[in-house]
Image: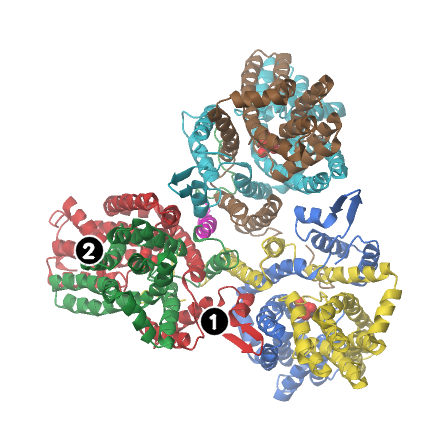
Chain colours: A red, B cyan, C blue, D brown, E yellow, F green
Amino acid sequence: MQAANMKTETERPHLTKKDLFQANWRWLWSSQICWNYERMMSTGYLFTMLPTIKKLYPDKDDRIAMMTMHNQFFNTNAYIGGFIVGMDMAIEEKKGRAAEETVAGLKAGLMGSFAGVGDTIFGVILPTIFGSIGAYMGLKGNPIGAIIWLLVNFAVLFLRFSLLPLGYTQGERLIYAAGDKLNRITDAAILLGVTVVGALIPNVVTANVPLVFKSGKVVLKAQTILNQIMPSLVPVALVALCYWLLGKKQMNSTRLIVTVLIAGIILGAFGIIGN
Amino acid sequence: MQAANMKTETERPHLTKKDLFQANWRWLWSSQICWNYERMMSTGYLFTMLPTIKKLYPDKDDRIAMMTMHNQFFNTNAYIGGFIVGMDMAIEEKKGRAAEETVAGLKAGLMGSFAGVGDTIFGVILPTIFGSIGAYMGLKGNPIGAIIWLLVNFAVLFLRFSLLPLGYTQGERLIYAAGDKLNRITDAAILLGVTVVGALIPNVVTANVPLVFKSGKVVLKAQTILNQIMPSLVPVALVALCYWLLGKKQMNSTRLIVTVLIAGIILGAFGIIGN
Amino acid sequence: MQAANMKTETERPHLTKKDLFQANWRWLWSSQICWNYERMMSTGYLFTMLPTIKKLYPDKDDRIAMMTMHNQFFNTNAYIGGFIVGMDMAIEEKKGRAAEETVAGLKAGLMGSFAGVGDTIFGVILPTIFGSIGAYMGLKGNPIGAIIWLLVNFAVLFLRFSLLPLGYTQGERLIYAAGDKLNRITDAAILLGVTVVGALIPNVVTANVPLVFKSGKVVLKAQTILNQIMPSLVPVALVALCYWLLGKKQMNSTRLIVTVLIAGIILGAFGIIGN
Amino acid sequence: MAIAWWQIILLTALAFWMIIDQITVGILCNYPLLIGLVAGIVMGDIKTGLVVGATLQLMVLGVGTYGGASMPDFMTGAIIGTAYAVISGKGIDFAIGLAVPVGLLMVQLDVLARFTNTFFLHRVDQRIKDNDINGVARNVVYGVFPWGISRALPVFLMLLVGNNVIQQVVKALPTWLSTGLSAAGGILPVVGIAILLRFLPTKRFISYLIIGFFAAAYLKVPMLGVALLGLAMAIIFYKQSGNNNQSDDEDNQSNTGGHENASGEYED
Amino acid sequence: MAIAWWQIILLTALAFWMIIDQITVGILCNYPLLIGLVAGIVMGDIKTGLVVGATLQLMVLGVGTYGGASMPDFMTGAIIGTAYAVISGKGIDFAIGLAVPVGLLMVQLDVLARFTNTFFLHRVDQRIKDNDINGVARNVVYGVFPWGISRALPVFLMLLVGNNVIQQVVKALPTWLSTGLSAAGGILPVVGIAILLRFLPTKRFISYLIIGFFAAAYLKVPMLGVALLGLAMAIIFYKQSGNNNQSDDEDNQSNTGGHENASGEYED
Amino acid sequence: MAIAWWQIILLTALAFWMIIDQITVGILCNYPLLIGLVAGIVMGDIKTGLVVGATLQLMVLGVGTYGGASMPDFMTGAIIGTAYAVISGKGIDFAIGLAVPVGLLMVQLDVLARFTNTFFLHRVDQRIKDNDINGVARNVVYGVFPWGISRALPVFLMLLVGNNVIQQVVKALPTWLSTGLSAAGGILPVVGIAILLRFLPTKRFISYLIIGFFAAAYLKVPMLGVALLGLAMAIIFYKQSGNNNQSDDEDNQSNTGGHENASGEYED
Ligand SMILES: OC[C@H]1O[C@H](O)[C@@H](O)[C@@H](O)[C@@H]1O
Ligand SMILES: OC[C@H]1O[C@H](O)[C@@H](O)[C@@H](O)[C@@H]1O
Ligand SMILES: OC[C@H]1O[C@H](O)[C@@H](O)[C@@H](O)[C@@H]1O
């Protein structure tokens, strides 16, 4: 094993409250700052861990190894993802680089369900509630609803900040106590997330077929036909197509975006697809 | 064991058809007559069993014990609850006070599912059917639908009367034959009941927020905002609140009712909640 | 065992491509040509198998036995049922009459799920899609939608033709590889079919109660009352009644049809049931 | 038209009886339509009674009282509405306008009745300790009075004082109190539902509570439709719990694909 | 405009063919739109044929014939409706008004055809006993006649006698009979559905029958939507039965949380 | 009214900040309402800002960005809409008519930003190899620019050139390009959803994807309602997987019927 690993626990540097605060602060600002289609939030996670890495791994090889690991694909809901970081820090503090694989597994194992739960709460539920209130008041020119929403957002910000320390102190206990339950909770959370994503399709994708066939006085609207077959048929078909394309070897997210962009412009230009 | 228990079966008094009829009659009239939030139908059950208790337990201690047991919390659908009484009588007749715990368990075990099934049939299904017919005819001034409903109610009354004897003769057999199935049927019945209760909330609770904010020409209706968030949001919130309050040590149904009443009057007086 | 069975595999006649084609052709034309309530598609299946039977079973008893077996109750979706025929042919070719029971079981085991899947695809999905397109265009006097549908039907016809050979070459492998999965797939397919049938009831049965009660100026429409109780109440009740009648010993499909026909005419004549 | 004293007595008796009827024989019954009919007969105007009762009936279609949950007391509403519609000759709308707030206010007396009986419950406990069987019986029977009076008294008073006085009293009542009482009537059923949920294994079946609510609140499915959906889910639950707990259960045919008889029908 | 004899012959042939087509190749097909198109071509007025066919098509969108359930025969309706719309020049509404009752009445002939074939079935049984293969084949093929004639004959007659005569006959028919026949046509599909349910393991899947009905009747979801919902439930059922019956099934990943490849994607 | 240079600068800063805010602190936030409010303050007409923001907000109620799915950028729309409504005095409808296409076109810049960051990702990879921790940090932080500039630049330009120029440019743009770009904006979110589905165990949960879609598309249930339904199903799933995997789980009370305490309540 590596050098860092040889030291007894007491020899190994300890993480202080300040370290936790710093990580929390970094996670807040960086988690999505370099978000990209290839590894999504990997860089944010890495950035958050840099001071910890510096502290725990004096050895150059260890550092590189851990940095590399932390720059692997990662994606979760930023609001509650701090909990995972906290757990990770506790484990690395105790086990050092020996925990490399454990941590990688932990991150991959938890990110999905944290995304499901966090996105539903902070992406669907809260914005629906306060967005409704605020928008309705706003329509009448009344800023109170908007101000309430602002205040709620401050409160949420405050709460978020408690999750990383919580993960650090309680994470392991919670996760291990949960045992097999954890898998089930994960699955249930993903189920919830997937359901919401299903509903997202007709809500977020705007793809009508404005084609109109005329011959004499006869007017045929393509979208009317499509609606009769199935509502939101085109969005569904496009999602399915993109999903399938992403499974192809030659295709990656970058290429797909370019493809869709060009296809969109062309189809739009010819009036085949519109809003 | 107690005195009554020592006798052989032949020594022990037998329940006659008349006894069954009397219990049936008493159950009909008393099951909910002293209904209260603390033990709901306990007194009705006790009242129904009094003659049986007199007959089966000459011993004073036995009587007091059995009366006490039968005055414990009990709640089920009155229409079909007679079946449980019938079973109980059969068991007590055979085993005497030795069955005390068995009977207590039986009552607690069956009341939930009987409530679910009975309430759905006699509280939702029949009144929907005959209420629709009757109301529609009634709106036109035609009493025939109402009269049909009356006749159906007589028929139901007649049918109800057969359940206690059925429970007495067949109950044990049915229940034991069912074995593990019984738990599953119970669960399924409760599931059905809970579903219907979920639908009851938006239907039975009237709680709008008639607050209207005005500033200049701008008018803001609070209920419109709430509806945009979720239909029947206030009733749901109130049910959740009361449910949670009932879990508190200091809270019981009595206090809750007074609390809600006062809160309702105050909120209503300030125009925060209305119909 | 029978004579045919004694031969080694090489002795036994082999089925050629031409045989498969012929079966395919026959299945196409005959599967429902003698459809009847008693055994539905049995005769079509038998007709399809006749040349194979002639070829594989020179022995008279074998022939009669196999023809009898193939004339037992069979019902599936004609579009994809060829797959079953193909499998059957492969098995009979290999095992001869020894496969009699295997084949009977196979047919009975697969027909349900093939019906569920096939009917949903070719009875619900495709006609909804192309029927919508075609009807909408047709309403404007534009025949293109109808023509597209025609072309699709030719394409489907073409595809259907590949299923029997596929069943012949791959059927056994697919089915056996599936193992226990097959039962589950079957069940899932039936589930889908049953769901669709549930939706068929309000869509395909036209049974209103046009009764109108008048007394003075008061007008009472029976159907309005029924709708308030439950939508499509009469169709559901009729289906339940027929289902129950079919369970009676003295009742069979023949009698039921006559009964319903006469009842329909009478009820219609008295204005109790209408469209 | 003025109300006759015998009409007041009959309607008061009806009010007393109807709630006893509801918790016992269930004939005249627990729903406004039939009460409206009887009130109409008493008032000599069946049609008005029917129409008032029917209108109120449609507001509570399929809404039953579960686990002691109070619901708007449109039975009392039907009596008062019918009586004053006939007396005042002001028609159905007036009657409904009177019946609905009365029904909502009456929720409080329903709660009061269910509440008062606790008193007798504790006396029953006492008599049991004394082995006083007759005393037990007596105290249970006393429960009839809170129930009956909770309906009879307000009906009697409202009829006695007459429409004008009611309206004057109502006018004299501070608005905050009348709207407060009416609002309290609207939310009191919540207590019953909460108690019910406490006595059911709600946490185990919370999903179905949500689904029932979802169907009623979002999809506007009427109660009977929700019961139908609940039935379907209950059956699924039943079959599945069978699958898990006893694999040789006769209902679990997922491995066998069912048994068919000679003519291809499923025997099950 | 009067109908020409060759038009009668062609439409009669079309009627004969269309039902054979439906149970065999499925090209011209089993739906009114295409029949209306062809009838329109024959009558020299494609547009009328299309509109009549399309209108009828929309009434049966996604409604297939399952397990031998009869459905309103709007194909025959399309032929008659188109023909008389063109002949009489009375327009589309007239055509639809004719086509719908004709479609409902025709259900009875569909049932009759499916019914008559039982006769040939029993002859086939006989020939099998005699090892008379050709006899078997012949009797199966005879089934083509009940099917074809059940459509061709009424179409032929209705075209032959002409609109006026039809209307006179219809007038001569006692009302009770015509409404009776039409009502019977509306409910006859019930028999097919009931037979189908008998041959399916309905009791095991009764919940899904209810859910399908619920979606269509209460939520007004069109057939394709119901099929989608059914698909979702079928998949859930499939996965769950796997969980119960074989815990090492590769589809059951509830304990492992799926396998991810290097770039974080799920491989499944 | 003409826009002042300091207003341009403030709104440009707002545009830069708002997207950073969204991916970090989430205060001013990720939704058009609040941006409209701030833009209104800057423009000296809070009411217009609020109304524009609120109108746009209602179009995306409960629609969050999941797994990197882009959504119409109505925040930028709110800035531009508010600014030009105030400048031109043409009212709310004009503002919305401007904001919606801007929001759709901006999707492409959101995609571009998310896309450009890949560049820094690879530089980070490089620095890691060199054990250059500061270099790593620096390159991560650079990600702030694609994000910020993707919003700030277009806002700056659109404000700078003024309404007239925009409209002239728009007029000068070939129609095919503008409609093409706007169409592309409408479908680009599809990519995000597809990526998301790739990174979720979609095949395992495909049923729930269908059900969520079904509820939204067929039953028109709003997002929060779908989340409610999803919650119910998630709980059922959780309990059932417990039944299958560990029979002594404390949540699985199907055999015991729950534990009741002395007063009959369920303890759970
Ligand atoms: O729910 C069971 C039961 O609870 C209470 O006793 C009353 O509300 C009854 O009407 C109901 O049948
Ligand atoms: O349901 C299977 C099958 O049953 C019958 O044979 C006919 O109704 C067919 O159209 C159908 O495909
Ligand atoms: O879905 C998890 C996560 O995915 C991406 O990182 C972004 O879309 C976030 O907004 C979201 O929370």
Which residue is nearer to you in this view: C123 or F27?
Answer: F27
Residue type, numbered disc 1: Pro
Where does residue D95 sit, x and y in percent of width and height? 64, 31
How packed mark 1 is, by other alpha carbons closer than 10 Å (few <14, some 14-19, many 20 or more), is some
Magenta highlight on residue B78: no
Secondary structure under the numbered disc 2 in the rendered image: helix
Mark 1 and mark 2: span between their CA atoms?
48 Å
Chain ID of residue with mark 2: A
Magenta highlight on residue F247: yes
Where does residue E237 sit, x and y in percent of width and height? 53, 58
Q: Quadrant of ligand 3?
A: bottom left
Q: Which residue is mark 1?
A: A210
N-term-proximal mark, 1 vs 2:
2
Label 1 or label 2, whichever lies nearer to me, is 1
Q: Residue at x 45, y 67 (%)?
A: A235
C63 left or right of C174 in image: right
Q: Which residue is mark 2?
A: A48
Residue type, numbered disc 2: Thr
Where does residue E119 sit, x and y in percent of width and height? 83, 72
Is any atom of residue E252 visible in this view?
A: no
Secondary structure under the numbered disc 1 in the rendered image: loop
Question: What secondary structure predominates along the stretch shown in magenta?
Answer: helix
Q: Is residue E61 above or below residue C237?
A: below
> Residue B63: which quarter of the image?
top right
F55 left or right of F143 in image: right
Chain ID of residue with mark 1: A
- Magenta extent: F225-248
Where does residue A38 sit, x and y in percent of width and height? 28, 67
Q: Which quarter of the rendered picture does the N terminus of chain C lie within?
A: bottom right
> Residue F3: which quarter of the image?
bottom left
